[in-house]
Every structure is written in structure tokens, then in C-alpha cells.
Amino acid sequence: MHEADIEKTAFRTHNGHYEYLVMPFGLMNAPATFQATMNDIFRPYLRKFVLVFFDDILIYSRDVKEHKIHLKMVLSVLVENCFVANKAKCRFGSSQIEYLGHIISGEGVAVDPNKVQCVLDWPKPKNVKGVRGFLGLTGYYRKFIKNYGKIAKPLTELTKKDNFHWGVEAEKAFIEMKQIMTSSPVLILPNFDIPFEVECDAAGRGLGAVLMQQKQPIAYFSKALSEGNLAKSVYEKELMALVLSVQHWRHYLLGREFIVYTDHKSLKHFLQQKVSSPDQQCWLAKLLGYQFEVRYKPGTENRAADALSRCFDEGEMNTIISFPIWSDRQQLLDELAQDSYIQHIIKEVQNSPTSKPGFHIKQGVLFYHDRLVISPHSPSIPWLLEEFHNTPSGGHSGFLRTYRRLADSLYWVGMQKSVRNYVRSCDVCQRQKYSAT
């Protein structure tokens, strides 16, 4: 402590007043001052063979001989600046060491098993404070966890003002987070002599990315999309995934050439494309200063980032409900329940599941390859065709588009013929189109 500041640290006890002669932790600026001092004295060696975080000093070397030299240099600096190391808390010549909650070894970086045990033993939160504590602990290791942002979203929602209500989704996320922490992968250490690779993807309700070198992961990144961002086009969401992932790993990528892989082919030439909206201009401006090449990689090959961005559907009927026609879904389900043709097939599938390949039953309803099955003689077919072809959402599309839109969720025998005949007989299409097919 400076002599002029010693009196400012005075505190009173039953034995009288005392003052600190050395700086204690607890003063407002003490941590920042101590870290700045450590950075100053080790500045010539930082990130060459020394890492310092407050009083945690990590010395790394390629071999034992080099390590002895580095160790001697670090201890000499401590002696010259009147710092003392506690021998009981020191470890020398280790091939694997615990540092800031991570296990660091020649293979890479892994989560400390003691911290994993803390997560497993964490009790079910009773209030917002408990949720924040759990998210704080697991969030520290989010770079090890695929899809972290979307898995944790039900818990994150609970931290909003007056929004704490522990339900089924929160319980599922809480349990899933504990299970994932027990199987977190070992991430390799970055090698700045070889180029970095970024795989990014946007699908479902989130974004995902993986930072890699030589096809081995260094870190994961994922982010759940807000309701406003969900309404954006696929192109904008893919561009957002690219920009956010590059910004997230800015400290690795800035000043170096790297490669970005995406499964959206139009992004391959986005730097040469005409900017058509203020949002795109904003995203592109954030990439200025980076040197990278965008390469197209199909979704089947871009598996890591694709998995990070996708989430599972919670309900089997959610997809059906999202279509406009299903406002009368109960009427259609009641009709299927009384239809003898459908009920006969359901009994056959129940008695022998292999007798009808592709057919299966969910919640008492018959599906064919996840498409709702209706009778070819159903009285609902005419208004279904009208809904998918004549309405504004149908847009009087041709046969192929109308059929694909229907076939996404429905199936009946002779479906193609029904759709083709309806489109050919549509009065508006006959008048306005060259060929109503």
C-alpha cells in the first residue's frame, strides 16, 4: 500500500484500530489493480509460455528441458518484485492440470469433473436466484455443449420479471442439461500456425456454429432466436449465424485468413451481391476487417453446425396446427374416427405393424410417413383442395406446388389425380394462365 493510502484501509476491532500495509482483496479496485500488476511484471512472457489470472499462474512448455528454463524465469520475476508463491498450492512438471475449472492436457481442454459433480448435485431451483445460479455454472462451460442456447432457453425464460413458473419444459431442460454435462467432449487447443474453420447454420428456432482446425472442434456456439428474428427469411438467418459466429470468435479470427462453411448456397457470393435491405447492410458492416472465404457445404456434410441449430418438435400435431386449414381440425379428426376405411387400416396396423409399410399410429390417429391419412372418399377433400389452391396462401399455384403443399401433411389414395383434376378445372386458372397444369 502507498503510505498515503494506508489510513484509508483502517478497521476497528475489540483490540483497537488496524490498518493494512499490503493491499487486501475486498477493496473496490483491488482485483483490477492486482491483475494489472501481474500483467506488467510478466508482460515479456505473456501468451508465450505464461498465462496469469490473478494469483493463478500457468506455465506451459514443449518439453521438460524447456519447462525448467521457463519455470526459472517466472520464479525470478516473482522474487524481483517481492511476490511469494505458496509451495503447498503449486504443482510442477504436470502433464495434466486443473486451471480455472478446466482440465488442460496435451489432448486438449475438458471440463473439471468436480464442477460436473456440482451440476449433478444441484437441487431443483425454487426461485429465480436458483435458476440464475444454475445457468451461471453451466453457462461457464457452454463452449463444450452443443445446442446450449436452445436447451437452456426454457430456464432462461424463467429469469424474466414475474415469469418464474417451474413447468414440464423447465424440468426437461434442467434434467437434459445435467445429462449433457456428464458427456461433454474434449476440445483441442488452437494452433495459430494453421487456418481456422467455422461451420455455421441456422435452422428451426436457433443458430449454431463450430470453430475447428483440421476437422477437430475447438469451441461450440449456439443461440436461440427471438420471436422477431424467427420471422426473418432463411437467407437473413443464415447470414446472422455467419456474422454472430465470426464476432463470437473475433479474438481467434481477426487478422488471420479463415474459411467459413455454410449450407446456404447463395451466401457463397454474398460479398459480391447487391445489398437489398438495411439489415443486410448492418450485418455486412460487422464483417469489415476480416479475411475469409465462404464455401458451400451441404447440410448432410455440415452436421455439427446443423445439429447445433436444430431442436426437436415437442408435439406431434404442432406442424398440422400451423397450417391455416386446421382451424377445423377437430371436425376432420371426428370424421376420421367414424370412417370405416380408416378404422379398418388402423386395426390392421395394430395387429401387424409390418403388414402396411410406412403406416403408423400416433395418439390414435393414422399417419403415412408422418402425413395424416384420410379416406379417398372423404367429404373434406373438396374444401381441402380449395383451401390449398384458391385461398391467398394457395395463390392458385400450379399442380406441382399445390400437391407438394398438401403432401407435406396429408395423404390419401389417388391424391395426385385429385389435385391435378382440381387445378385443371379451376375457373380462375383457366382464364388467367396459359396452361392450367
Image (cartoon, helix red, strand yellow):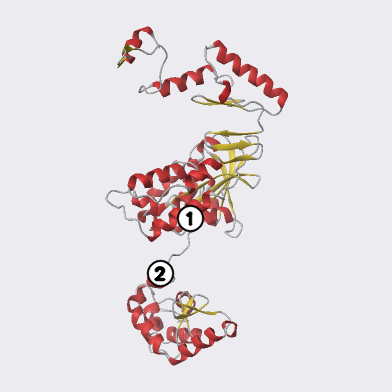
**Could you tell me which secondary element the residue under label 1 belongs to?**
helix
> Does residue 269 appear in the picture of this structure?
yes
User: In the image as oriented, which residue stretches furthest toward the front?
Assistant: 14
Q: Determine whether 234 is above or below 130 in the image.
A: below
Q: Residue 98: x and y, percent?
A: 57, 34
**Three-letter amino acid code at the position of disc 1:** Glu
Residue 310 placed where, x, y %?
Answer: 49, 58
Res. 413 visible in picture: no
The CA distance from mark 2 to mark 1 is 22 Å
Mark 2 lies on residue: 318
Q: Nearer the viewer, residue 25 or 126?
A: 126
Label for residue 176? 1
Q: Nearer the viewer, residue 145 or 289?
A: 145
Mark 1 neighbour density, 10 Å: few (under 14) some (14–19) many (20 or more): few
Residue at 48% in and 46% down: 119
Q: Nearer the viewer, residue 327 or 404?
A: 327
Q: Position of residue 265 (x, y in %)?
A: 55, 56
Q: Residues within 10 Å of mark 2 (few under 14, many from 20)?
A: few
**Residue at (51%, 40%) from the top-left corner?**
249
Looking at the image, the residue that sits furthest to the left is 162
